[in-house]
Image: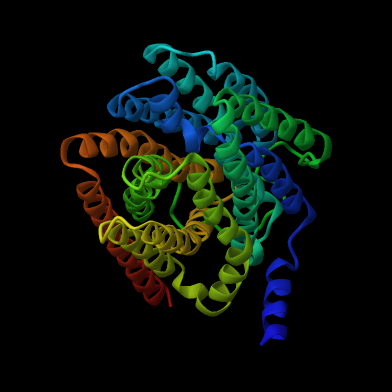
Amino acid sequence: MIGRSLRLYRDAYRGLPAPVWLLGGVMLINRSGTMVLPYLTLYLTQHLHYSVTEAGLVMAVYGAGALVGTFLGGRLSDQFGFYPVQFLSLLVSGFFLIFLQFAQDFYTMCGVVFVYTLLGDAFRPAVSSAVAYYSVPENRTRAYSLNRLAINLGWSLGGGLGGYLAGIDYRLLFWVDGLTCIVAAIVLRAYLPVPVRPGPTVGKTDAPIAGIRSAYRDRLFLIFVGATILFAIGFWQLFGMIPLYFKQVLHLKETQIGLLMTMNGLMIVFIEMALVYAVEKRYAHLKVGIIGFGALLVGLSYLLLNTGLWPVLAIFAVFINTFGEMLAMPFMQSFTVERANPQNRGQYLALYSMAYAVAQITAPAFGSQIVAWAGFPTLWVVVMGFCLTSAVLFWWIAAQEKKTALVGN
């Protein structure tokens, strides 16, 4: 049994190209400093004394910047290549993140947050294009999973340290987060091999979906993006309203909230790669159906939050939420790349990333308004409904793909 488990872990990491590992290292450095986002609502309400509604609006502006940034990042990656977009996004956003601590009033905060996220989130479609460029279809889902592993290992380190630093001085979060962005940019520029031509159009033989010219005219993919938005609205509560719920309702300390966020990251670090490898090996033909099951689990995690006020249920809810995330997100990115070809990959990945940006805009303001109007229990019911609806849509897409495959044969 132990030997089989060790072989599973070994095989899960085997065969990934060196640049994919290097991209993972860049993400690890960058995300080890990720402290501002998970504690931003607490910083705004506890340190700057914003109302819950104002904090929710700032988080919505955060999402608006992400929406514009991911769109521009995808377009620029297709036009100029993913390499310069990654480097400049990390470097410049790091300086803006350090500057963010000096914003005090509501409107200045909104303006700086918007510019920072616009610059920072241009990185997302660029790094996704880079992972696709340096991988092949046979190991692409695992390549994305490794990227997520690096993100979440960094998240677990940064989340735990962030809770400690927040207890000392919230301003330390901005310095550490900004400096790790700058260091990640330097490491990327120094060690990641530059493509022969600076774009995702070189050296891959991925076959595009016949008849698909633009992501914006791919009907099935647009439905997929809509389902992803619903899923992401539920998922983003983990970084917006859930920490506030833990603080205001369960009366947890910042350090305890940080440990719960660390648990999320550590689960992904130790489980996701092996889980994705085992699931893909056996159920590769059910990729979108697996995404639907992951969305279902995320929805059920909010049902747990409504069953009582015991901290043990909060821990179990984070566990179920994370398991759903591990099943859904790597396969989402892989499905997105498979719908595209190398010439429009940035466009597809930008549209996919924009789904999360839309959720970043709507989820915080939507969540804070519902909490102010009807309380946390109502919010958990609503976002559970969103996740269940997204699961049904993903399963419908899987059925449509199966019909298309049968017709093609």
What is the x, y in percent for residue 269? 62, 59
Q: Quadrant of residue 167?
A: top right
Relative to 146, 230 lies left or right: left
| Left or right of 285, for residue 98 | right
Question: How many badges with numbers are in the image?
Answer: 0
The residue located at (37%, 64%) in the rendering is 297
Q: Quadrant of residue 101?
A: top right
Which residue sits at x=33%, y=67%?
395
Residue farthest bottom in this picture:
1
Front-lying residue, 250 or 353: 250
Quarter occupied by the N terminus: bottom right
Tell me: residue 106, above or below residue 340: above
Q: Quadrant of the C terminus?
A: bottom left
Where residue 45 sits in the image (x, y, percent)? 38, 26
Q: Quadrant of residue 67?
A: top left
Q: In the image, residue 235 lies at what x, y percent?
A: 39, 50
In this view, 360 is above or below 276: above
Q: Is residue 22 visible?
A: yes
Q: Nearer the viewer, residue 251 or 349?
A: 251
Q: Judge left or right: residue 25 versus residue 328.
A: right
Residue that lies at the very extreme toward the right in this rendered image? 190
- Find the residue positioned furthest to the left: 374
Image location (x, y in percent) of residue 388: 27, 60
- Is residue 105 depicted above or below 35 in this figure? above
In this view of the protein, can residue 70 be seen by the observer?
no
Q: In the depicted view, which residue is nearer to us: 391 or 214?
A: 391
Q: Residue at x 38, y 68 (%)?
A: 293
Colouring convention used in this rendered image of the protein: rainbow
Q: Nearer the viewer, residue 183 or 15?
A: 183
